């Protein structure tokens, strides 16, 4: 009889421990951390051969249901010439613009907490048109470097685009479009 009572007591103790273990797992005061926002796959860049603008495309995952602001950024060198009505570019009228270009955009995540989008960086023009009224300003070449994207809202980045350099050369006096 003592054996049965002791066996029964041990069984209750074991079952009580299992209930406690399962009860602890069900009411865990330490929930698993949520995945943090992150860029998924490669951030890409492509240059528009017609105008030299660069498009930066990306996908970010693990976002909450709030709008996210992104900033695409790059260094650019753009070379311009003045073209006369005869289609020629006289020497001495070339202008080079060197600066950092940044463009921001805000997107709302989709129902799966993701944003897939592209932001375009525009080729800057000279602050003042160097061409006389009888001439038009034409883009000879543009070179982009250090092309990146940042998630400003969540403090992620900058993340380098692939490729992080883009360029196009239209010639020393490109033909009218």
Image (cartoon, rainbow, N blue to C red):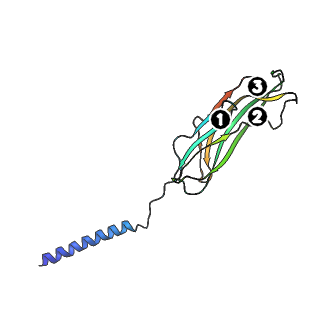
Q: Distance between the residues labelled 2 and 3?
A: 21 Å
- Residue 85 picture location, percent across and down: 84, 23
- Residue 12: which quarter of the image? bottom left
Disc 3 is placed on an element classified as loop
Label 3 sits on residue = 176
Circles 2 and 3: CB distance less than 8 Å? no
- Residue 67 picture location, percent across and down: 61, 55
Q: Earlier in the sequence, mark 2 or mark 3?
A: 2
Q: Distance between the residues labelled 2 and 1?
A: 14 Å
**Other residues around mark 2 within 10 Å, as few (<14) / some (14–19) / many (≥20):** some
Circles 2 and 1: CB distance less than 8 Å? no
Residue drawn 57% across the image and 36% down it: 162
Disc 1 is placed on an element classified as strand
Give whichever of 60, 1 is nearer the camera: 60
- Residue 38 picture location, percent across and down: 53, 49
Label 2 sits on residue = 97
């Amino acid at each position: 009889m003592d054996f049965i009572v002791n066996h029964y007591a041990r069984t209750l103790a074991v079952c009580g421990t299992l209930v406690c273990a399962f009860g602890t797992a069900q009411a865990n005061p330490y929930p698993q951390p949520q995945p943090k926002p992150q860029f998924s796959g490669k951030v890409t860049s492509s240059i528009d051969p017609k105008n030299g603008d660069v498009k930066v495309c990306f996908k970010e995952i693990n976002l909450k249901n709030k709008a996210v602001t992104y900033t695409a950024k790059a260094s650019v060198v753009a070379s311009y010439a003045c073209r006369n009505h005869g289609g020629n570019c006289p020497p001495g009228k070339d202008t080079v613009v060197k600066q950092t270009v940044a463009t921001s955009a805000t997107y709302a995540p989709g129902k799966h907490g993701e944003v897939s989008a592209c932001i375009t960086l525009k080729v800057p023009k000279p602050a003042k048109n160097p061409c006389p009224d009888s001439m038009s300003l034409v883009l000879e070449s543009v070179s982009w470097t250090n092309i990146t994207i940042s998630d400003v809202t969540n403090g992620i980045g900058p993340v380098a685009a692939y490729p992080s350099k883009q360029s196009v050369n239209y010639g020393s006096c490109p033909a009218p479009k």
